[in-house]
Image (cartoon, helix red, strand yellow):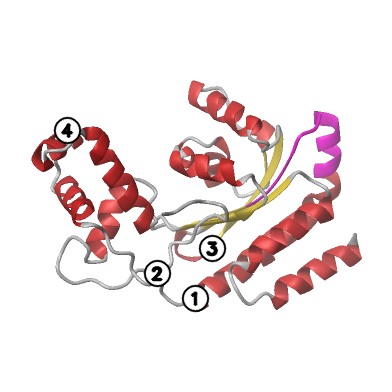
Amino acid sequence: MILELNSFLQSLERADALEQIQDLTVQLRDMFAVDHAVYHWLSADGEQYGFGTYDPVWVQRYVEKDYMRIDPVIIGCFQRFHPVDWRQLDWSSRAAKAFRKDAIAHGVGNQGLSFPIRGPNGQLALLTASHCTDDRSWDRFVHANQREWILIAHFLNLKALLLAAQRRPAPTRQLSPREVEALTFLGMGHGRAKVAELLEISEHTLRAYIESARFKLGALNTTHAVARAVSEGLIVVGGAARNASGGWPGRETD
């Protein structure tokens, strides 16, 4: 295992593109014989990157349903600085129970261990191992591998920060006229029903415009989409090209 760990850290040191973290998570999963290994980056302004071995269908579902808001793992890691065994988290609410059932149905696994890492400017990153197994087997895994994963988590996050800092801004993805109108009225404080009335469209159609704009902007929710559109000059005069908003392999963003 020591030789494999050294080989992994050498591969990490040689990485020269943020996307290579995806390959490293696959290597990490295979090295420790778990179902999944995932690296998830969250910054204070809403940027997020995800790399890992989850089914792309689950990744897309997680983003579309905005599960990050109710995910006990995310909430628990915001509140802790030490490794977080998923069994220690609060899964008692109806939303958390439904989320867990959905996650297991998509192959995430019934056991998990997440390592929160704090970075500059409010960044929180998580390195997670998840697996489908019984409590006793998972206890053995945690006891045998926790120290190595703590080390890997910190070195992986340092590399991700370095590569993200070197990444050049991506071209701005232009909003359609209807998307601009929808975000503008929302930014003025109108509710969705009123915006739909002003645009003379159904609320269902309005939702489609909002979701399209949100994905183009890499926003986590509607409020974030409006804020980003304003800051980038997409619904006001001026602004600059946005920085790459990240994403998850397998996530459809168009």
What's drawn in magenta, residue-wise? 127-142
Residue 222, picture quadrant? top left
Identity of the amino acid at label 1? Answer: Arg
Q: Mark 3 points at which residue?
A: 119
Q: State left or right for residue 128 relative to residue 136.
A: left
- Cα–Cα gap, marks 2 and 1: 9 Å
Is 79 located above or below residue 232 in the figure?
above
- Cα–Cα gap, marks 4 and 2: 32 Å
- Cα–Cα gap, marks 2 and 3: 18 Å
Q: Which of marks 2 and 3 is nearer the N terminus?
A: 3
Q: Name the residue under label 2.
A: 243
Q: Do the residues labelled 2 and 1 touch (CB within 8 Å)?
A: yes
Q: Are marks 3 and 4 in contact (CB under 8 Å)?
A: no
Q: Residue at x 35, y 45 (%)?
A: 221
Identity of the amino acid at label 2? Answer: Asn
Crowding around mark 1 (Cα neighbors within 10 Å: few <14, some 14 to 19, many 20+) is: few
Q: Which of marks 3 and 1 is nearer the N terminus?
A: 3
- Cα–Cα gap, marks 1 and 4: 40 Å
Q: Earlier in the sequence, mark 3 or mark 4?
A: 3
Q: Mark 1 points at which residue?
A: 167
Q: What element carries label 3?
A: loop
Does the magenta portion include 138? yes
Q: Mark 4 points at which residue?
A: 193
Crowding around mark 4 (Cα neighbors within 10 Å: few <14, some 14 to 19, many 20+) is: few
**Of 89 and 197, the residue lying toward us:** 197
Residue 191 drawn at (x, y percent): 17, 37
Q: Earlier in the sequence, mark 1 or mark 4?
A: 1
Q: Earlier in the sequence, mark 2 or mark 1?
A: 1
